[in-house]
């Protein structure tokens, strides 16, 4: 009877341990969305209102991020995006745009991660007769699935299994963006968005105590083309999700190597600080319709000891279908 009682206690302890692991995984990993440091390279990853809010007829983007490379299985995040104009009225300077984003986030020995796809519909309208200011509003709906590979788990009891290794959920988001270009020297962009407005249930135990919390962010970016070939681009941004906050501040410098009707070549770089977490260094280049950016997060948070100060490498590549004729020496209008 004593042996049988011990075996029952051991089985109960293992089940309790499994429950704790699942709860911690849900609370700590899935409670937050995928994360990128390159806010401007593919802006719909940060705010859905920027869908179609660019110079040209369509935009396609690829983003990759590898974080904490010193661990055996670092965090890896991929994204693919496509945007295009659905309808544009050149007389009222208004129209509709659509976008599609696909994410894949993976980390750890068990391959814990999220796969999701979001569809965005945005509407923009000129606020002035000379098209120097625009407002854009968007609605975003998505569907995601999170899970892990339990075949790689090492259990104390070989007969112990997880009852549920995946969870699926819908998401809803919205965004607003404002663009102003008073002259050929200044551009100002301000935006705010909210995602996971429905707070989807992501509990592996089919309880109602674990949700993907709402994520709010605000963003402001200016570009001052004060010299013939050089621009300054200060930026500030803030986002909040379930007691996790991020504040960004920094800027970039752009050098217009060549900018005419036939060729557009730009080089740039800069730095941005994510408060209490990392220093983000970036370099980028544009060649006609292509934009390539590389950034690196230098970690100085409390995790710097464990990560040996190795942060995150991020690469972004964007291709745009630009108009045949571009305005020489002027900052681009986002709706053309």
Image (tube, grey):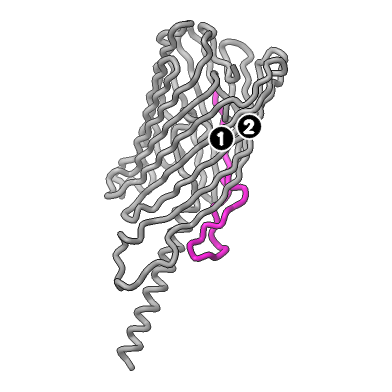
Residue 32 in the image: state x and y as whole percent. 49, 49
Q: CA distance from mark 1 to mark 2?
A: 11 Å
Q: Residue at the front extreme?
A: 86
Range drawn in magenta: 195-222
Query: Which secondary structure, mark 1?
Result: loop
Q: Within 10 Å of the Cα at label 2, are there few (<14), some (14-19), or many (20+) other Cα atoms?
A: many
Toward which corner of the image does residue 313 lie, by quadrant? Answer: top left
Q: Judge left or right: residue 65 versus residue 82.
A: left
Toward which corner of the image does residue 286 lie, by quadrant? Answer: top left
Q: Within 10 Å of the Cα at label 1, are there few (<14), some (14-19), or many (20+) other Cα atoms?
A: many
- How many numbered badges does the structure rendering display? 2
Q: Judge left or right: residue 157 versus residue 131.
A: left
- Residue drawn at x 66%, y 24% as measured from the top left: 95
Q: Which residue is mark 1?
A: 47
Q: Which residue is mark 2?
A: 122
Query: Which secondary structure, mark 2?
Result: strand
- Up the image or down, 197 lies above or below 180; here it is below
In the rendered image, residue 48 lying in the magenta stretch gets the answer: no
Q: Residue at the bottom extreme?
A: 1
Residue 25 in the image: state x and y as whole percent. 43, 58
Closer to the observer: label 1 or label 2?
A: 2
């Amino acid at each position: 009877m004593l042996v049988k009682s011990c075996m029952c206690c051991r089985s109960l302890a293992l089940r309790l341990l499994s429950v704790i692991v699942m709860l911690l995984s849900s609370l700590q990993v899935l409670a937050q969305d995928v994360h990128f440091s390159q806010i401007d390279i593919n802006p719909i990853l940060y705010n859905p209102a920027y869908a179609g809010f660019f110079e040209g007829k369509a935009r396609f983007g690829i983003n990759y991020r590898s974080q904490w490379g010193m661990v055996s299985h670092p965090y890896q995040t991929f994204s693919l995006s496509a945007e295009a104009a659905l309808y544009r009225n050149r007389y009222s300077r208004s129209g509709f745009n659509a976008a599609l984003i696909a994410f894949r986030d993976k980390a750890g020995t068990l391959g814990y991660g999220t796969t999701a796809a979001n569809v965005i519909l945005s509407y923009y309208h000129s606020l002035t007769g000379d098209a120097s200011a625009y407002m854009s509003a968007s609605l975003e709906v998505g569907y995601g699935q999170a899970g892990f590979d339990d075949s790689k788990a090492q259990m104390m009891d070989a007969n112990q299994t997880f009852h549920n290794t995946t969870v699926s959920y819908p998401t809803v988001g919205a965004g607003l963006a404002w663009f102003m270009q008073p002259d050929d020297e200044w551009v100002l962009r301000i935006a705010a968005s909210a995602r996971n407005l429905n707070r989807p249930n992501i509990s592996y135990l089919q309880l109602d105590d674990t949700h993907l919390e709402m994520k709010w962010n605000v963003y402001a970016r200016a570009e001052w083309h004060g010299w013939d070939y050089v621009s300054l681009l200060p930026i500030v941004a803030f986002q909040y999700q379930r007691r996790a906050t991020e504040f960004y501040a920094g800027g970039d410098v752009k050098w217009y190597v060549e900018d005419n009707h036939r060729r557009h070549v730009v080089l740039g770089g800069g730095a941005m600080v994510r408060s209490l977490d990392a220093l983000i260094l970036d370099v980028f280049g544009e060649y006609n319709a292509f934009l390539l950016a590389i950034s690196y997060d230098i970690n100085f948070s409390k995790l710097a000891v464990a990560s040996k100060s190795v942060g995150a490498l991020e690469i972004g590549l964007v291709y745009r279908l630009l108009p045949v004729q571009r305005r020489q020496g002027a900052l681009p209008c986002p709706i053309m």
